[in-house]
Image (cartoon, rainbow, N blue to C red):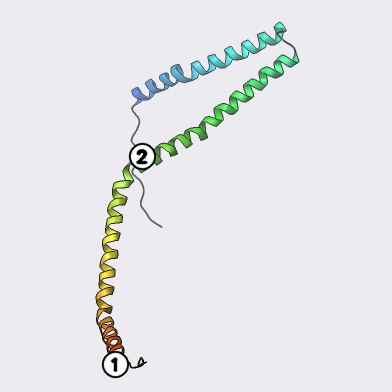
Amino acid sequence: MSDYLPPPMPQRNPVTLQAHRREVLRQIALPLTAGVLLLAALVIWLVLAGVGDAEVWGQISTIFILLLFMLLALVPLAFFVAVIYACTELLRIIPPFARQTQQAIEQIESQVKSGADISVAPMLKIKSFLAMVDALFGRQNHK
């Protein structure tokens, strides 16, 4: 095994670390806790006040379940939007390069065809000459 040890992590600045912890408490934990407590208090008040019957609460819970599913459906929607955006960007970028590639392939194709034509040209001339001689003198083909 290797004896390589990563360099030790530098010590954090205690002033900025303490400031970061205060900001996390003030900007994340406190509002989240307050929101959960307010929502719980609202639900308890509505239940104790006797608002609605079981049917109304069933409809309300159905709405919340549907809201949850709709929020969860935003993730695949965002993914599909990103894929569509990437495809449109690729379609904007690819055609010039595709045309250059197509032109290069067409040039290679024409060079290969001309090379093949040049390589068989002597044999075609000989066959043509023999066919002309056979036609002129009425002989049968020599095989």
Q: Name, please, the residue furthest toward the right.
A: 54
**Nearer-N-terminus badge (1/2):** 2
Q: Name, please, the residue furthest toward the top.
A: 49
Residue sitting nearer the eye, 88 or 118:
118
Residue sitting nearer the eye, 8 or 74:
74
Residue 8 at least partly seen = no
The correct choice, above or below, for 94 with respect to 138 in the image is above
Residue 32 at least partly seen = yes
Give the residue drawn at x 42%, y 19%.
22
Give the residue drawn at x 59%, y 23%.
67
Separation of disc 1 and disc 2 at Cα? 70 Å
Give the residue drawn at x 29%, y 64%.
109
Residue sitting nearer the eye, 51 or 89:
89
Q: Quadrant of residue 9?
A: top left
Amino acid marked by disc 2: Glu
Query: Where does the image place residue 140, in percent across and percent down from the top left?
Result: 36, 93
Query: Where does the image place residue 42, in percent across and percent down from the top left?
Result: 62, 10
The correct choice, above or below, for 38 with respect to 94 in the image is above
Amino acid marked by disc 1: Phe
> According to the image, label 2 marks what residue?
89
